[in-house]
Image (cartoon, rainbow, N blue to C red):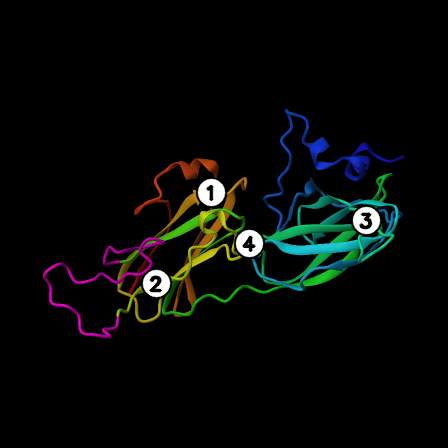
Amino acid sequence: MRTPFVLALAIASVALATSCDDVKPDEGLDATLRVSGGQFRRGDMPAEETGPAVKDVSLSPIVAPGASDRKCAGVMEGPTTAVALALGGDPGFWIVPAAPPDVTAPGFPTFAASVSFSSAIAPGTRTFIARAVDAEGRFGAPFTRPLDVTPAARPTGRLVIALSWDTQADLDLHVVDPTGVEIWKRNINSYEPPPPGAPPEAPNTPHPGGVLDFDSNAQCVPDGRHAENVAYADKPPSGHYTARVDTYSLCKAAGAHWRVEAFLDGTSVGAAEGSSTEFDTRYSHDRGAGVLALELDVP
């Protein structure tokens, strides 16, 4: 006898599953795999393998923590009505409805989804799992594929303060260095021009200091980075540094989990993690904005 839970996985659409006003759907925010438009189900997939099979899945074998909007598509056997997608070790899996056959796979159900990966996913090899599900709630044998999780390279520098996060939200890194200069998207480097009335600088005068590399997901335009870095290519000023995280917009995401880490001469010298909610978007987004994430002293 099929359990109501398993039957619901096969025949309930996302709309049906979320139609109850009293039950908020599980958004899978602690999962390292995120599937746009999918329905998250917490727990393990059923052990039985009597359902249809997945014939093939197309997905890049190399991903970076925080990678977003990666295309995932596949072909299943005839009686499939949905596909379950997961990464090994995650607290649950995602259900995506099957689509009719297309020109690339005549006679076979297909699926296409946009998948993203949490910035907290650990480097190494993870197993991607896809299982077809029929109208009776029967799961087929797992189709597995190894994924190589490789962190994106950080910018080089004597001091690097790095912010990364895990959704399409628009977060901004603010760094205040010992001279009191604040580096952020509207002041991307620590260079302070001579005050009015001071002699002009000689041509090609070098300006060592911190530089912001990118305003990621600006104005909710996804760029796949989910990261911003302030880097000092040369010896940074000695003294006290603070790093803050400003939640400019969640960009329709339910929230964002972020991490700030500082590296001095390639060695981690401090890290902090936190979460952004809708409440964090209500404050000013000017100079001095954001929540305090990290403080450090550089000799």
Q: Magenta region: which residues?
A: 178-206
> Which is in the foreground here, disc 2 or disc 1?
2
Q: Tag 1's secondary structure?
A: strand
Q: Tag 4's secondary structure?
A: loop
Where is residue 200 drawn, in percent x and y?
14, 68
Amino acid identity at mark 2: Val
- In the picture as drawn, the residue positioned furthest to the front comes out as 103
Residue 211, numbered circle: 2
> Which is in the foreground here, disc 4 or disc 1?
1
N-term mark: 4 or 3: 4
Label 2 – label 4 distance at C-alpha: 25 Å
Q: Which residue is mark 4?
A: 120
Amino acid identity at mark 4: Ala
Q: Which residue is mark 3?
A: 132
Give the side of residue 239 with respect to residue 220, left or right: left
N-term mark: 2 or 1: 2
Q: Vertical placement of 89 versus 61: above or below?
A: above
N-term mark: 3 or 2: 3
Q: Which residue is mark 1?
A: 276
Pointers 4 and 3 in contact (C-beta within 8 Å) = no
- Crowding near pointer 3: few (<14 within 10 Å), some, many (20+)? many
- Crowding near pointer 4: few (<14 within 10 Å), some, many (20+)? some
Q: Tag 2's secondary structure?
A: strand
Q: Is residue 240 magenta?
A: no
